Image: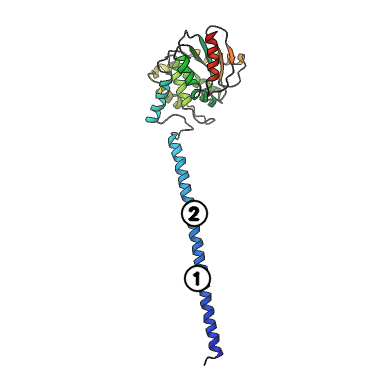
Amino acid sequence: MSTVEDDEQDLTRKQRREQARAQRRALEEAEAASAVRRTRLTQLGIVVVVVVAIIVGILVATGGSSKTGIAKPGKEAQKVVAEVTGLVGGIPQNGNTIGNPSAPVTLQYFGDLECPICKQFTLGALPTLIGSYVRSGKLKIEYRSLQTATKEPETFKTQQVAALAAGKQQKMWYFIELFYHQQGEENTEYVTESYLQKLAQQVPGLNLTAWTAARNDPELANSITTDGQAANSAGFTGTPSFLIGKTGGAMRKFEYASLTDPSSFDSAIEKLLKA
């Protein structure tokens, strides 16, 4: 026959079992919640790794050289040189001018080698103009200097003279196109002597000794001053800016509609060709 004490002990054991089961449930729920958190953290970690991998891939694809600009030696540099050579190779050059000296239409292009908007023109409308009009002898383009994007006047003069010096060997347009194709990140002071030397080394057939000597020619620095005065007379405040006209005749200010779509350039050139 059970006693009250036995009943109390049975109740106590039952309570302990229920308490233990409750604790196990709590532990199981905590473990389940922990597992969910670990899964989420793992998924997040995977996402982070993927994002990092994408960023690294982009940097590799762009040469990881957004600040310095210059393409890495090897296939990347060869690709840039081949693209520029395909654009201007085989076309007559004379100093700052590309195209047949007797071309009926002249386009004066005022630019700053560090100007990112000029790069848009180089990669956008310019290839069509060169392919359709310059290569066929209908148009010649004169590159003229106007400081807008380059912060330091001395840096501007140095880089523009370096391009003009390549023009002494009829290779200025190789130099300026290689520069625009490999512009560094804006406001990072990437234009150093090393940068200019590497560009010169990429110019096909450029005699580096003669190029270095030509950079000391005071006439080249004077031409930059003359270009700036001409730009001021035309009312230019930004780059790229353009003057266009019949060769040997009066030049007028050309207002383009787009730097990537050559249509407005085409219309102006065709109008002059028919005049």
Query: Marks 1 and 2, how far apart in space?
Result: 25 Å
Residue furthest to the front in view is 274
Residue beneath the point at 56% across and 14% down = 243
- Image location (x, y in percent) of residue 124: 50, 24
Q: Would residue 216 be visible to someone looking at this image? A: no
8 sits left or right of 212 in the view: right
Residue type at the position of mark 2: Leu
Residue 275 versus residue 84 in the image, above or below: above
Residue 77 versus residue 256 in the image, above or below: below
Q: Residues within 10 Å of mark 2 (few under 14, many from 20)?
A: few
- Image location (x, y in percent) of residue 272: 54, 10
Residue 142 versus residue 70 in the image, above or below: above
129 or 214, which lies in front?
A: 129
Q: Residues within 10 Å of mark 1 (few under 14, many from 20)?
A: few
Residue beneath the point at 51% across and 31% down = 185
| Residue marked by disc 2 | 41
Element type at mark 1: helix
Asked if labels 2 and 1 touch by Cβ distance under 8 angstroms, the answer is no
Residue furthest to the bottom in view is 1
Element type at mark 2: helix
Q: How many marks?
A: 2
- Image location (x, y in percent) of residue 165: 45, 16
Quarter of the figure with the C terminus: top right
225 or 26, which lies in front?
A: 26
Tell me the colour scheme of the image.
rainbow
Residue 28 versus residue 223 in the image, above or below: below
- Image location (x, y in percent) of residue 108: 53, 14
Q: Would residue 31 be visible to someone looking at this image? A: yes
Number of the label disc, if any, that sits on residue 24: 1
